[in-house]
Image (cartoon, rainbow, N blue to C red):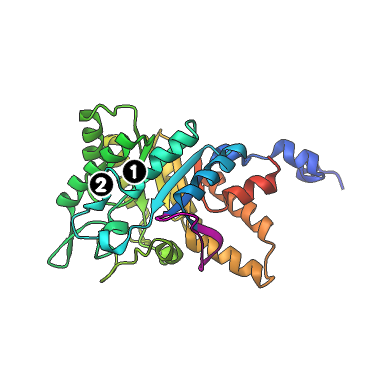
Amino acid sequence: MFLQRRNRILRQSPAIRSLVAETQLTPNDFIVPLFIDEGENVHSEIASMPNYYRNSLDITVKEVKELWSMGLKSVLLFVKAKDETKDNKGTEAINPNGLMQRSIRAIKDACPDMLVMTDVALDPFSSYGHDGIVENGEIVNDATVEVLAQMSVSHAEAGADFVAPSDMMDGRIAAIRQALEQSNFSKVGIMAYSAKYASCFYGPFRDALDSAPGFGDKKTYQMDYANRLEAVKETIMDVEEGADIVMVKPALSYLDIIREVKNAVDVPVSCYNISGEYAMIKAAAKMGWINEEKAIIETLTSMKRAGADLIATYFAKDAVRILGH
C-alpha cells in the first residue's frame, strides 16, 4: 500500500512528539490560589480538597518563597474572615489592617517580585455569604460596586499588583479602574472574572472560606451555564471598561467558552481550574480509577489548548514537579 502522507510519523517517539507538540505547559502559565487564615502556625487541610491547606500568614510567607523557588511567579489571595467581623456592609473588606491587607504587605516584603493578585468580592466578609450587599432579600448592584471600588483601592494601597473582582456585579470594572486612577494607582492591573458561571463545582472552595450563601443561590449575578454568547458580551464589556486580563470560571466544563473568549478579545485570557475540578481528580485517583499525574497534565493542557494564557489552579506545584521544571 502506498500512502503519500503518513501522519503517524510525527507520533512515533517521545522526542518527535515533544518537538511538534502544539501546546506546552510551563510554570509561567500558572497562578497559585492561596487560602489565608488568622492566627499563627495554622496549617489546616481542607477536607474536600485533599493536600490543599488554609494557612496562617507566617506559613503562607514560607509557601510563597517556595513557590518562587519553583518558578511560580503569581499568587491569588483569598482570606477567611472571622465570623465576628462579618456584616452586610463589607466593613472588614476595606479595613486597612484586615487580613487581606496584612497578607499583601507581608508577601511583598518577603518576596517583592512575586506578582500578588487579590480576590475582590464581599462573600468572605458578608454575614449573608453573598458577593454583594443585601437589601430586602436582593443582592443590590450599585451599592456593592461602591464597596468593591474601595476594596480595590485598599488592596492597592497595601501593595497588590492586580485586583481580581470575582463578584459579577454590573459596571464594577469601570468603577474600579476609575477609583484606582483617582487614587494614583494607575499601575495596578485588573484581572476581571468576566465569565463566571453559577456552578455546582464551587463547593470545596466555599468550605475553605466558609463563604457559602446563607440564603438562596448566586444565579442572579453569576452566569447561567447554558449561555455562550453572553460570556463573550460580558467579556468584551469588561475589556472596554478597563480590564487588563479576563477570566473564564470554571474551566474544565467551559473549554468552549475559553476559546470563544480568546477569539473575541485582544487581552490575555485566564481561566480558573476550580476546587470541584481539583476534588474530582483527587477522589478518582484515591479510588485507583485514574492516574492522578496524567489527569493533572491532560486537563491543564486542555485549558491552555482551548486558549487560556494563564491558569489559576490548585495543581500548580504538582504540575511543575510532574513537568520537571
Amino acid at dot 1: Gln
Residue at image coords 47%, 50%: 34
Q: Check contact, mark 1 vs mark 2: CB within 8 A.
A: yes
**Residue lying farthest to the left in this orientation:** 136
Q: Secondary structure at mark 2?
A: loop
- Is residue 101 covered in magenta? no
Q: In which quadrant of the rendered view does residue 159 lie?
A: top left
Q: Amino acid under label 2?
A: Asn
* 39 part of magenta stretch: yes
Is residue 110 or residue 1 the one in the foreground? 110
Tell me the magenta residue range. Answer: 37-53
- Residue named by callout 1: 101
Report whether residue 136 is seen.
yes
Disc on res. 185: none
Task: Give the side of residue 226 with respect to residue 115, left or right.
Answer: left
- The picture places residue 170, in percent across and down from the top left corner, at 22, 48
**Dot 2 alpha-carbon crowd within 10 angstroms: few under 14, some 14 to 19, many 20 or more:** some
Query: Residue tagged by mark 2?
Result: 95
Badge 1: few (under 14), some or many (20 or more) residues near its Cα, within 10 Å? Answer: many
Q: Residue at x 39, y 37 (%)?
A: 265
The reply to whether residue 307 is in sight is no
